[in-house]
Image (cartoon, rainbow, N blue to C red):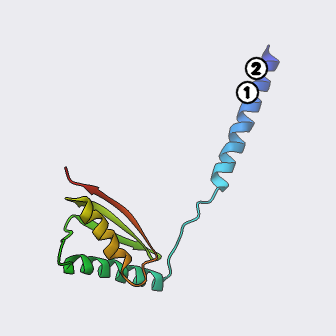
């Protein structure tokens, strides 16, 4: 019985050590932007915000805009489905925007 317990403890310990080593050696790749990409994304963000402010039909004070490598993400709240789709259309119309992720929710 002692031999089985010792064998079990050894296998468990070796397994945990291997698992720990595997976790330590795992590297999480970060997606970095170059300085130019960051500047382009900042400009896209500002252009979308400006276009929202210049929209004659709707103002979007509760919508946040973020850009990453040309992909624009919209978050926040609007009063109607028309405003949500309009915000997406405005963002898609900005030169340099390659994709729009519309996470806007409706106010209740």
Q: Tell me residue 28's x, y (percent).
A: 58, 60
Residue 19's quadrant in the figure? top right
Q: Is residue 61 left or right of residue 32?
A: left
Q: Nearer the viewer, residue 6 or 107?
A: 107
Residue 65's quadrant in the figure? bottom left
Q: Image point 76% across, 31% down: which residue?
A: 10
Q: Which residue is mark 2?
A: 5
1 and 2 marks in contact (CB < 8 Å): yes
Q: Which residue is mark 1?
A: 9
Task: Answer few, some or many: residues within 10 Å of disc 1's Cα (few below 14, many 20 plus, some between 14 and 19).
Answer: few
Q: Image point 72% across, 37% down: which residue?
A: 15
Quadrant in which the N terminus appears: top right
Q: Image point 39% across, 73% down: which residue?
A: 67
Q: Is residue 94 left or right of residue 98?
A: left
Looking at the image, is 100 positioned above or below residue 94? above
Task: Answer few, some or many: residues within 10 Å of disc 2's Cα (few below 14, many 20 plus, some between 14 and 19).
Answer: few
Q: Nearer the viewer, residue 88 or 2?
A: 88
Kindly state the secondary structure of the residue where label 1 is placed.
Answer: helix
């Amino acid at each position: 019985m002692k031999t089985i317990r010792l064998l079990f403890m050894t296998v468990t310990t070796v397994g945990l050590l291997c698992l720990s080593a595997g976790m330590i050696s795992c590297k999480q790749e970060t997606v970095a932007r170059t300085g130019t990409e960051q500047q382009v994304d900042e400009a896209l963000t500002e252009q979308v915000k400006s276009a929202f402010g210049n929209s004659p039909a709707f103002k979007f004070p509760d919508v946040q805009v973020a850009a990453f490598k040309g992909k624009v993400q919209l978050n926040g709240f609007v009063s109607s489905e028309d405003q949500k789709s309009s915000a997406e259309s405005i963002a898609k119309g900005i030169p340099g925007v390659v994709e729009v992720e519309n996470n806007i929710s409706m106010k209740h």
